[in-house]
Structures are given as C-alpha cells and as structure tokens.
Image (spheres, helix red, strand yellow):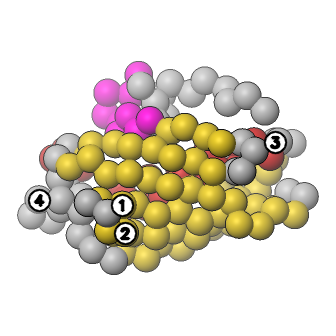
C-alpha cells in the first residue's frame, strides 16, 4: 500500500505551519517505522518541557506508520502512553514503531520515543484497518 499524501497532518505534514513536521521512514517487510523530529518551544507544556499530548501524538503516529504496509487505512482505536522521563524543548528525538500482532483488521503496535539513547516515553496502540 502506498501512503497517500497528507501534507496537512499535524504530526507529519510538511505544509502544516502549526504542526510538528516529523519525518518517518518505513520498512514494510518487517512492519517497522523510524522517525525524527526537533520539538520546538512552541510545543512546550511546563517550563521547557514538551507537552505530554504532543508526545502522545508522536507515539501514535509511529504506530500508524508501522501499520501502513498491512493494507487498508489504519486508524487508532486506542492508545496507552507511558511517560518515563521529561523531554526538553528544542531537542531532536527519535521515534520507533513496530507491529507486534496483526489479525485481519486489528493491529497491535508499540512505539518509543528516544533522546540521548534513553527511552523517554512508550506507547501501545490498537489500530483498526479500514477497507
């Protein structure tokens, strides 16, 4: 399945001036995703730290990107986030997503956000593949 252009997406859209503009790559054979983004001060929550909702959106997107090669349009049914360490603003973070289980229309995926070699947040998602 080829990713349809969505240039206005808040997380990955290059044409969304208010968005994060995260860049992702995929390995459709192994159902993996890899991304990077520098989180500007505009996404601050409390005192120089990135807002938790922004981190959740990035973890969600990594799970979706990992699911793209399975067919259908992936949409998140639910997402659980675990915040381990605060993420400072104006730092580049790395995102990883992977499919851990897949049954017809239901995908289970997990993701992690890494900074300086340490996991700062983790996500687990159930994703529906719409036809």
Q: Residue at x 63, y 51 (%)?
A: 32
Residue 67 position in % (x across, y down): 70, 50
Residue 81 position in % (x across, y down): 47, 72
- Which labelled disc corresponds to residue 72? 3
Q: Where is 19 relative to 75, above or below?
A: above
Q: Is residue 63 left or right of residue 89?
A: right
- Residue for badge 2: 119
Q: CA distance from mark 1 to mark 3?
A: 29 Å
- Which one is earlier in the sequence, the residue at label 3 or at label 4? 4
- Residue for badge 4: 48
Regarding mark 1 in the picture, which secondary structure is present there?
strand
Q: Nearer the viewer, mark 1 or mark 3?
A: 1
Q: Where is 106 relative to 9, above or below?
A: below
- Residue for badge 1: 114
Is residue 37 visible in the rendered image? The answer is yes
80 or 116: nearer the eye? 116
Q: Is residue 123 magenta?
A: no
Regarding mark 4 in the picture, which secondary structure is present there?
loop
Quarter of the image that includes the C terminus: top right
Quadrant of residue 17 within the rendered picture: top left
127 or 84: nearer the eye? 84
Q: Nearer the viewer, mark 2 or mark 4?
A: 2
Instruction: Rate crowding at label 3 as few (under 14), some (14 to 19) or many (20 or more) other CA atoms within 10 Å.
Output: some
Q: Nearer the viewer, mark 3 or mark 2?
A: 2
Q: Is residue 88 left or right of residue 125?
A: left
Quadrant of residue 50 within the rendered picture: bottom left
Instruction: Rate crowding at label 2 as few (under 14), some (14 to 19) or many (20 or more) other CA atoms within 10 Å.
Output: some
Q: Is residue 92 left or right of residue 102?
A: left
- Which one is earlier in the sequence, the residue at label 1 or at label 3? 3
Q: Residue at x 29, y 59 (%)?
A: 115
Residues in magenta, as a range? 15-23
Q: Where is 14 relative to 89, above or below?
A: above
């Amino acid at each position: 399945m080829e990713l349809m252009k969505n240039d206005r997406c808040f997380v990955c859209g290059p044409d969304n001036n208010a968005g994060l503009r995260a860049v992702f790559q995929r390995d459709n054979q192994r159902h993996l995703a890899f991304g990077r983004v520098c989180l500007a001060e505009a996404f601050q929550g409390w005192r120089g730290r990135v807002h938790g909702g922004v981190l959740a959106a990035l973890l969600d997107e990594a799970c979706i990107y990992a699911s793209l090669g399975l067919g259908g349009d992936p949409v998140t049914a639910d997402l659980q986030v675990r915040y381990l360490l605060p993420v400072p603003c104006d730092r580049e973070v790395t995102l990883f997503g992977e499919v851990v289980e897949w049954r017809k229309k239901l995908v289970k995926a997990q993701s992690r956000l890494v900074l300086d070699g340490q996991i700062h947040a983790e996500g687990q998602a159930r994703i529906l593949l719409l036809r």
